[in-house]
Amino acid sequence: MKKIIAVLLISAMLLPLAGCQSSNSTASNKKEGEETKSTTEDTDKLHFVYVSPLLAHPIWLVSKEGFEQACDELGIEGDWVGPQNISPEDMSKLVETAVAQKADAIITQGLVPAEPVQTAIEAGIPVLVVDSDIADVDRLAFFGKDVVKQAELLYDSIKEKVGENTKIKASIQVAALNYQTAHDQIEAIEEVFGAHPGGFEVLNVTESNSDKMTSTTEWENTFQTYPDLNVAINLAAEAGPACSKVVEDKELSDQVYVYGVDDTEETLELIKSGELDGTVVTSFFNYGYQATYWLYQHITEGKTPEQIVNDAGTILVTSDNVNDYDEELRVKVDLQ
């Protein structure tokens, strides 16, 4: 009998540890030392899992803020998980874990492979995809940036600066070229800028790999190889600030117009100081906040978005609106 009791005690001690082990993820909305679902009321809570592509990247922490706020308002148990570095394989495992845990809903981004997402959907778990779509799964909706509108906003601003008769010689940097979202953005830019009266040419395309040092090195090499470059378009959050610093160091500010994406604190400060000409932003806050509300309304009220693909709000932030654009991106739209 003593041996049986000892085994049971050891098992009871190990079970909580098994549920918390993860080398590349973390959970939000759970205070340290707090037990999950310890009461009957907690047991009735909906459980949402947000599988982020980057666990602690500054721009994705804005989504985490929105996700946690919505979970608090709606009484949802929310887990924020993701890899430290871009890894579709790790994202896939985290989606599979959410399915095994019988999560009530999943929010994720399009770098995750389609198969585990479709498996979750077939298991009865609604999935909302943000930022980069997964078009070949039966997701509840996609909520992200309008890449054509992004290209149009960039072109309108750049055309005004360089003039209609000057050829736009651009370099583009993306996070990674092995993901469809990068190609979608590049293709939209090529199509929109292709109508420029003075001519348009993409001199090269590089990758930041979501790393600022890598981005810096790539931009240093680009400016050395293409000295007549006059427009730098950065389609990764860390790339705009990295490019801006290289332009400053090489004293090219009067020659090169630098644009970025997303609204990290560093990017906004560079716009205020005039070192970045603009950044295209969308509502990463609503990637968490709006997405959670839509899934909640779908589960509790049976509501479904009118369309699958939805623009989260795509605007260009410049020195003209840098101080007041934020409220425009935090507007929540309920399902009807």
Image: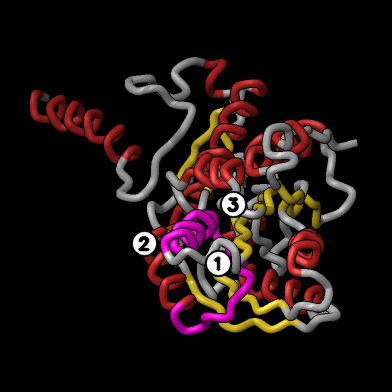
Marked residue nearer the N-terminal end (2 or 3): 3
- Which residue bears the numbered disc 2? 213
Q: Is residue 145 visible?
A: yes
- Residue 230 on the magenta segment: yes
Amino acid at pointer 3: Thr
Figure disc tally: 3
Amino acid at pointer 1: Pro
At x 60%, y 61%, the residue is: 258
Q: Is residue 31 shown above or below 330? A: above
Asked if marks 2 and 1 touch (Cβ < 8 Å), the reply is: no
The quarter of the rendered structure image containing the C terminus is top right
| Disc 2 residue crowd, few under 14, some 14–19, many 20+, Cα 10 Å | some
At x 75%, y 72%, the residue is: 188
- Residue 13 on the magenta segment: no
Of the two numbered discs 2 and 3 in the rendering, the one whose residue sits closer to the viewer: 2
Of the two numbered discs 2 and 1 in the rendering, the one whose residue sits closer to the viewer: 2
Q: Which residues are magenta?
A: 224-249
| Disc 3 residue crowd, few under 14, some 14–19, many 20+, Cα 10 Å | many
Amino acid at pointer 2: Met
**Distance of label 2 from label 1 (alpha carbons):** 27 Å
Marked residue nearer the N-terminal end (2 or 1): 1
x then y, percent, for residue 101: 49, 43
x then y, percent, for residue 301: 82, 32
At x 53%, y 40%, the residue is: 265
- Which residue bears the numbered disc 1? 113
Picture quadrant where residue 180 is located: bottom right
The foreground one among 291 and 58 is: 58
Picture quadrant where residue 196 is located: bottom right
- Which residue bears the numbered disc 3? 108
